[in-house]
Each structure stands twice: as C-alpha cells, then as structure tokens.
Image (cartoon, rainbow, N blue to C red):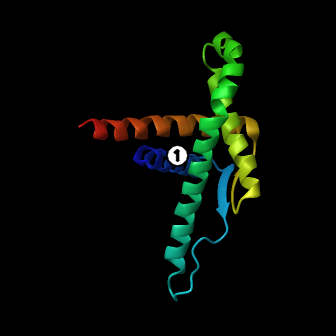
C-alpha cells in the first residue's frame, strides 16, 4: 500500500512540474476544503491545489496501470520500427486520456494542444518520475 501512495505522490509531483513548465497544461479544481475560517483562504487554496494534483496523479496512475499495457502490446510493431520512440506518443496518449477522463470529475486536467504540449508533458513527466522513482527506491533499499 505504501508503494501505491509513493507512486501517486510521484505522479502528482511530475504533473505539477509539467504544468509549471508548460503553459498549455493546467489543472483546475473545485473546492475540496472549504474556507469557513477567516484568514484561511490561502491555506485552503494550497490544500485544494495539492489535493487536485494528488487526484490527477491517482487517475494518471490508474490509466497507466490498466490501459497502457494493452496499448503497448497492440503498438509493439510500431514501437520496434521506431526504435522505442513511439513510447513517447503512447505516454502522451495516456496523458490525453487522463485529461479526457477528468472532464467528468470536479478536478480537470486540460491540455491545449495534443501534439506538442502532450508530447512535451509526457517527456517531462517521464523524466521527473524516473528521477523521483530512483530516489525513492534507493532510500527503500537502505
């Protein structure tokens, strides 16, 4: 269970970095935490933002766990022909699928341009996930 939580946090971090770098990728949410207390609006907004990224990270992880293996298997000939570069397109498609799924939730991931924004976001998310996953797995080996 702890590994799943770590993966969701890593996905959320990677999505945050990608949305911070790319202007065409935004995550918008409705209120998770109310700001009933006076002066708590800043902290409530921060909590809402963190929860929104964690929610999108969870959905992205579910899409990657359920849909991506099937798509990778079906696109294996193209992946071999492109020497693995088609994997970037698959990752972008999984990100786009996550954005489409979030249109039915209170938190929405929007990607302006499928090709360039999604491809660059997929590259950024892959790099951040690889680095963060390497750091978290090296800590657990000790």
Query: Which residue is pictured at 61% across the width and 43% down the height?
Result: 62
Furthest residue to the front?
1
> Is residue 120 in view from this perspective?
no
Position of residue 131 measured from the top left corner of the image (x, y, whole percent):
42, 37
Q: How many marks?
A: 1
Furthest residue to the top?
81
Q: Is residue 82 left or right of residue 43?
A: right
Q: Nearer the viewer, residue 123 or 51?
A: 51
Query: Which residue is pictured at 67% across the width and 10% down the height?
Result: 81
Quadrant location of the C terminus?
A: top left
Position of residue 23 measured from the top left corner of the image (x, y, whole percent):
65, 50
User: Dot 1: few (<14), some (14–19), or many (≥20) neighbours within 10 Å?
Assistant: many
Position of residue 12 measured from the top left corner of the image (x, y, whole percent):
53, 50
Q: Nearer the viewer, residue 102 or 46?
A: 102
Q: Is residue 141 left or right of residue 96?
A: left
Query: Which residue is pictured at 66% across the width and 41% down the height?
Result: 95
Residue 93 vertical placement versus 59 (above, below): above
Q: Nearer the viewer, residue 39 or 32?
A: 32
Residue 120 vertical placement versus 111 (above, below): above
SS type, badge 1: helix
Kindly identify which residue carries mark 1.
Answer: 11
Query: Which residue is pictured at 66% across the width and 20% down the height?
Result: 73
Position of residue 133 measured from the top left corner of the image (x, y, whole percent):
42, 38
Furthest residue to the bottom?
38
Q: Is residue 58 left or right of residue 81?
A: left
> Is residue 62 in view from this perspective?
yes
Residue 77 vertical placement versus 56 (above, below): above
Quadrant of the rendered image containing residue 116: top right
Q: Is residue 106 left or right of residue 136?
A: right
């Amino acid at each position: 269970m702890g590994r799943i939580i770590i993966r969701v946090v890593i996905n959320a971090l990677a999505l945050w970095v990608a949305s911070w770098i790319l202007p065409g990728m935004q995550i918008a949410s409705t209120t998770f935490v109310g700001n009933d207390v006076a002066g708590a609006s800043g902290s409530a907004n921060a909590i809402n933002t963190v929860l929104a990224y964690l929610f999108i990270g969870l959905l992205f992880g579910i899409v990657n766990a359920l849909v991506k293996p099937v798509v990778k298997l079906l696109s294996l000939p193209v992946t071999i022909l492109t020497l693995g570069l088609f994997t970037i397109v698959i990752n972008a498609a999984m990100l786009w699928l996550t954005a489409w799924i979030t249109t039915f939730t209170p938190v929405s991931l929007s990607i302006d341009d499928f090709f360039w924004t999604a491809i660059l976001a997929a590259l950024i998310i892959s790099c951040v996930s690889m680095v963060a996953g390497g750091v978290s797995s090296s800590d657990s080996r000790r």
